[in-house]
Amino acid sequence: MSWWLWVLVGVLALAGESISMALFLLYVAIAAFVAALLALLHLGAAAQVGVFVVLSLLLIGLVRPRMLHALVGRVPHRALTNQGRLVDRLATVTQTVTPDGGMVRVGHAEFWTARVTPPTPPIEVGSSVRIVYVDGLTAYVEPVASIPEVAPAPGPPAATQMAREES
């Protein structure tokens, strides 16, 4: 290939880099300029293309991450969600929860995909559940044991009987 074709590829890559500013096409341009030098030394077209591809991949894979780290600095990793705060919270089932999926509402407006833990049967809509653990964006839930209703304590039979007799 002619050296000027490699220079053209390099200039186009630099023009694209000026638009994208992602420090990606910069390394493609550098590899194209190296291939242009090899073309000036009358190296074969296959060798030029091979050097271009290998050098592009090496620069993008090895140099780009270090360059971005040097320019941006250390950015602390921030989790997508604060999953720890969900464990042991109560939620309401909005779509039947099975081992394959479902939906729960935590609070008033926070919806999560949910699954039941394996031995648990499906949980119907409207039931209260407790979040056992969170994996990614899926909450694993178990039903909350319902509190049995306590019947009102009966009054003393003698007092009731006496009240009826007096009236």
Image (cartoon, rainbow, N blue to C red):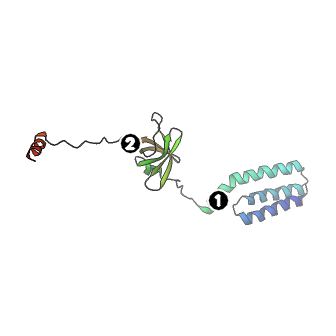
Task: Name which quarter of the figure residue 11 lies in.
Answer: bottom right
Residue at image x 29%, y 42%?
149
Q: Amino acid at mark 2?
A: Val
Q: Viewer-proximal residue, 156 or 90?
A: 156
Q: Residues within 10 Å of mark 1 (few under 14, many from 20)?
A: few
Q: Which mark is residue 144?
A: 2
Q: Residues within 10 Å of mark 2 (few under 14, many from 20)?
A: few
Labelled pair 2, 1 in contact (Cβ < 8 Å): no
Give the structural element (helix, strand or loop) at label 2.
Answer: loop
Q: Quadrant of the N terminus?
A: bottom right
Q: Please give left or right for residue 123 compared with residue 31 in the image.
A: left
Q: Please give left or right for residue 70 compared with residue 83 in the image.
A: right
Q: Position of residue 145 (x, y in %)?
A: 36, 40
Give the structural element (helix, strand or loop) at label 1.
Answer: helix
Q: How many marks?
A: 2
Residue at image x 65%, y 56%?
66
Q: Viewer-proximal residue, 23 or 114?
A: 114
Circle nearer the N terminus (2, 1): 1
User: Residue under circle 1?
Assistant: 68
Q: Which mark is residue 25?
A: none
Q: Position of residue 89 (x, y in %)?
A: 40, 49
Q: Position of residue 3 (x, y in %)?
A: 89, 58
Front tag of 2 and 1: 2
Q: Please give left or right for residue 64 compared with residue 86 in the image.
A: right
Task: Name which quarter of the figure residue 123 lies in.
Answer: top left
Q: Is residue 139 above or below residue 70?
A: above
Q: Amino acid at mark 1?
A: Leu
Q: Is residue 78 above or below residue 152?
A: below
**Residue located farthest toward the front when viewing the structure as drawn:** 167
Question: How far, Cα to Cα, is label 2 from label 1?
Answer: 49 Å
Residue at image x 85%, y 62%?
8
